[in-house]
Image: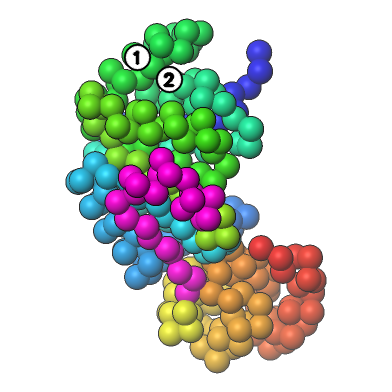
Amino acid sequence: MTAPSYRATRTTTVSTAHGTVRHARHHLDLTGARTVRTSQLTAAATALKTTVAEQGMLCLTAPAGAGKTFTLHTILDQHPDWHPIQVLPQPQARPDDLRHSLHHALGLPGQPPKDPGTSDDLIRHALHHPPRLLAIDEAHQLSASCLEYLRYLYDDPHTHLALVLAAGSHRIRALRTTPVLASRVTRWYDLDVLDTTQIPTAIPAFHPLWRTTDPVLLLHLDQAWAHGNFRRWATLTRRSTDRVLTNPEALLRRLSPRQEAP
């Protein structure tokens, strides 16, 4: 049997009866890394809350490595009451692949029906109650036929559905120029990288390695390599030891141009 071209998960959180606890995963599974409640995360959470309340459609974008997926997972894990479903598409996927992933993510019994109409009826019924939030990561990989299928589910008067499409900033043109989305997206939210005013507080909070580091050194490492990017800071932390505090240039030399590419 061919594996589906989508991966779908239901999100759960601590101290609920909704299932096993699942935390958003830091880049490189970095030991000791912590979630930092930045202004960017708070603003994204507000945008998501509004989208859910309006049953609207949100397009969440960010530069590669800025924490788009992590931010999305973190917020959804804190809101099991939104009944969120997350789907990660792969290139060249078909609407049938999306139907299969939704069938399993919604907890529908048995295997997905082979007949698309029967499958759609089951999915539409499951999306009627309770209201749900469907989050599609790397949404720029969706084909035109998959986008049209999402439009069908979103527009159906029987479903109660909010929709989040997450994509890299460099890929956003593919979504902005798609008519079925451009006319339906209720808000576009761009998740910015950390600015220089945030580095001295955000990075020590991110990992204990940097807890007592001179802010001047943190700003130097950020300007020279990390550029406010959490993925780069995770790489920097993994490659660092306490010696970086006395010889940061040696660390920067070890980070080759190939490793520096996002």
Query: Which numbered circle lies on residue 103?
Result: 2
Q: Is residue 208 visible?
A: no
Q: Residues within 10 Å of mark 1 (few under 14, many from 20)?
A: some
Q: Residue at x 70, y 84 (%)?
A: 248
Contact, CB < 8 Å: mark 2 with mark 1?
yes
Residue 33, compared with residue 255, is above or below; it is: above
Furthest residue in direction bottom, as rendered: 216
- At 52% across and 20% down in the image, what residue appears? 96
Q: CA distance from mark 2 to mark 1?
A: 8 Å
Q: Place residue 192 in its image quadrant.
A: bottom left
Tell me how many marks there are.
Answer: 2
The residue shown at (74%, 78%) is 251
- Number of the label disc, if any, that sits on residue 122: 1
Residue 184 picture location, percent across and down? 33, 45
Magenta stretch in the rendered image: 172-194
What's under tag 1, amino acid-wise? Leu
Q: Looking at the rendering, in which quadrant would you find the N terminus?
A: top right
| Residue 124 showing in the rendered view | yes
Q: Pinpoint residue 193: horizontal percent, then vertical percent.
A: 49, 71
Q: Does 41 sit left or right of 171 as displayed?
A: left
Residue type at numbered disc 2? His
- Classify the position of the C terminus by image quarter: bottom right
Q: Is residue 38 above or below residue 167?
A: below
**10 Å crowding of disc 2: few (<14), some (14-19), many (20+):** many
Q: Nearer the viewer, residue 256 or 245?
A: 256
Q: Position of residue 163 (x, y in %)?
A: 35, 41
* Secondary structure category for the residue under label 2: helix
Q: Is residue 3 left or right of residue 163?
A: right
Q: Earlier in the sequence, mark 2 or mark 1?
A: 2
Using the image as rendered, state which of residue 92 and residue 113 is in the foreground: 92
